[in-house]
Amino acid sequence: MIIPKHIAFIMDGNGRWAKAKGKSRTFGHKAGFKNLVEVVKACQELGVETVTCYAFSTENWNRPASEVSYLMDVPSELYSEKGKEFVEKQIKVRFIGRRDRVPSHTLKAIVSIEEDTKEFTKFEVVIAFDYGSYEELTTSIKKIARDAIDGTIKVEDIDDNLISNYLYTRDLPPIDLMVRTSGEHRLSNYLLWQLAYSELYFPKTYWPDFNKNELLIAINEYNKRNRRFGSIEEE
Ligand code: FPP
């Protein structure tokens, strides 16, 4: 079985999972966070090299204050409760997205866990937090325009490789497989540029129930796909 090098997740269905149990949305996100840690460890064991997950979108600020408040606490929980284990397991953590709108305690935790794990090279978890593709692309295009005006780059040099190098994901490998749980078939402003040639998989399972067995089913599904990257079948 070929193990995808880079898997991206949209961890959807926490709210519905909690509702089905008569619990609050925050209860669902807590279970979702716990599950993310398990999925990350399972990915590392299987030999995946990069895991990217959508933890908070640029649109998620519109959710109820209590829900936003809990999600803004998750980086601190990650740092205080899992920081040591991530260092032991040599898991590098990186956050992508805006940093100017998150509360200071959240930013502090983000910077701390990134700093503690920055030397690790074999396995990386990328957490999209206050992330949205429109914002990422708009910010990058502004920077490209500024660099072209001040002569750092030439307009003729702008190609897909150069654009990739202006994105938050600049030095990450291509995404082989994107999994969105809960049966929704949307990208929701997630890695629009980066997913151009990725395989997409949409299991019905709600994120808190997406376990190692479900992960193996997703990888098995990936193995059935025939990736041609716009070319045709070899003879
Ligand atoms: C979508 O499900 C999920 C989110 C918007 C948040 C996901 C966040 C976590 C799992 C916590 C991990 C965070 C970090 C920083 C490591 P939903 O609530 O929209 O589900 P619903 O569609 O059923 O309501």
Image: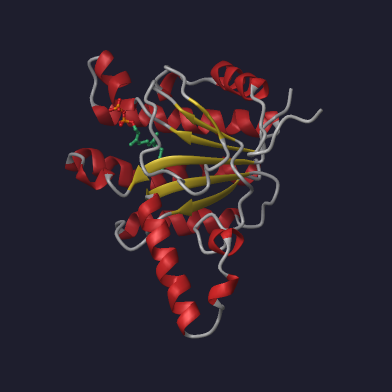
Please name whichever residue, 144 or 69, is drawn nearer the observer in this view of the structure.
144
Q: Position of residue 162 (x, y in %)?
A: 58, 64
Please name whichever residue, 110 or 162, is drawn nearer the observer in this view of the structure.
162
Which quarter is ligand 1 in? top left
Please name whichever residue, 157 or 218, is drawn nearer the observer in this view of the structure.
157
Q: Give the image's coloring scheme.
A: secondary structure
- Please give left or right for residue 186 compared with residue 22 in the image: right
Q: Position of residue 88 (x, y in %)?
A: 64, 43
Classify residue 152 by image quadrant: bottom right
Q: Residue furthest bottom?
A: 150
Above/below status of 62 relative to 9: below
Q: Position of residue 229 (x, y in %)?
A: 64, 39
Above/below status of 11 relative to 111: above
- Residue at the spot 57% in from the left edge and 73% down from the top edge: 156
Please name whichever residue, 117 or 148, is drawn nearer the observer in this view of the structure.
148
Above/below status of 131 relative to 18: below
Classify residue 159 by image quadrant: bottom right
